[in-house]
Image (cartoon, rainbow, N blue to C red):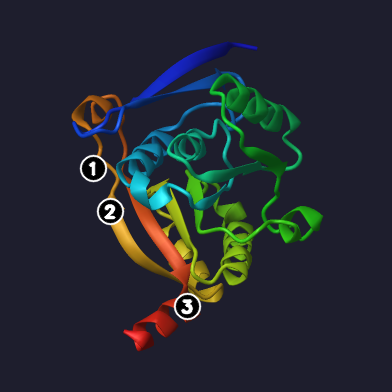
Amino acid sequence: MTTTISQHDFVGDGDSETSISVTVIENMKEEYGLFVWPCSVILAEYVWQHRSRFRDSTILELGAGTSLPGLVAAKVGANVTLTDASSKAEVLENMRNVCELNKLCCNVMGLTWGMWDASIFDLRPNNIILGADVLYDSSAFDDLFATVSFLLQSSPDAVFITTYHNRSGHHLIEFLMVKWGLKCVKILDGFSFLPPRKASALSGNIQLVEIVLNSAYETRSQET
């Protein structure tokens, strides 16, 4: 087992806000879950740059793995719940260790997409759902969107923010969003807001999207 510690810095913009640093424990041999992927770096930077939006919000991170975006949200004052598949005991334990390492008090729990057990029903309403690189396995897309749809119906004003590699599965993503009553309200090139020093270390065609419940979007549109 090859364990490494990585440090991720987020720089303030010259005002009274200080910069922050997040320390992450990575396991290079662990399947998927214990490595900081480029999508996590980009989503975490987005959280940092929009920290006033996240401060005092209730955040749920899906498929959190090393949890960088959720940890940044906690650092800027959000109430954060970190989740990953219930079967991944070593990933969940790593989340607890990383929270302790960063002196953060996050709730850590197992949540398997498409599984309707007590854990998902016990979740308190969330303002923002985060998911970095959760759209990598097309066989899991349907369960993911079913879970996101359920969570958004529990909190109709909430939004799902995710970063993903723009691979060939975008037609399936569009189909499933319609199936589960979801609507994309923002799409960004993931590198468009990334500081050059971070962008130079990453590669790929990564997008950031914000997704809401279509019925909630239509209601808000009618009100405005």
Instruction: Report how far apart the C-alphas of labels 2 and 1 lie in the structure.
Output: 9 Å
* Foreground tag (3 vs 2): 3
- From this viewpoint, which residue is outermost toward the right? 118
Q: Are marks 2 and 1 in contact (CB under 8 Å)?
A: yes
Determine which of the numbered discs, if any, sits on residue 188 in the image.
2
Q: Is residue 1 above or below residue 217?
A: above
Q: Position of residue 11 (x, y in %)?
A: 28, 28
Q: Is residue 158 left or right of 143 when viewed as pictured? A: left
In this rendering, the answer to whether 179 lies above or below 7 is: below
Residue drawn at x 50%, y 38% as measured from the top left: 74
Q: Is residue 83 left or right of residue 207?
A: right
Q: Name the secondary structure under disc 2.
A: strand
Task: Work out how far the residue at label 3 is from the one at label 2, CA to CA, in angstroms.
Answer: 22 Å
What residue is rendered at 47% in x and 41% in y? 77
Q: Residues within 10 Å of mark 1 (few under 14, many from 20)?
A: few
- The tag earlier along the polypeptide, 3 or 2, is 2
Residue 191 image point, x, y percent: 25, 41
Residue 135 makes an appearance in the image:
no
Q: Amino acid at mark 1?
A: Phe
Task: Specify the quadrant of the image occupied by residue 93.
Answer: top right
Q: Which residue is mark 3?
A: 216
Question: Could you tell me if the residues under marks 3 and 2 are in contact, i.e. CB atoms within 8 Å?
Answer: no
Element assignment for label 1:
loop
Q: Earlier in the sequence, mark 1 or mark 3?
A: 1
* Labels 2, 1: front one: 1
Looking at the figure, which quarter contains the C terminus? bottom left
- Say whether residue 216 is visible: yes
- Mark before the other along the chain sequence, 2 or 1: 2
Q: Which residue is mark 1?
A: 193
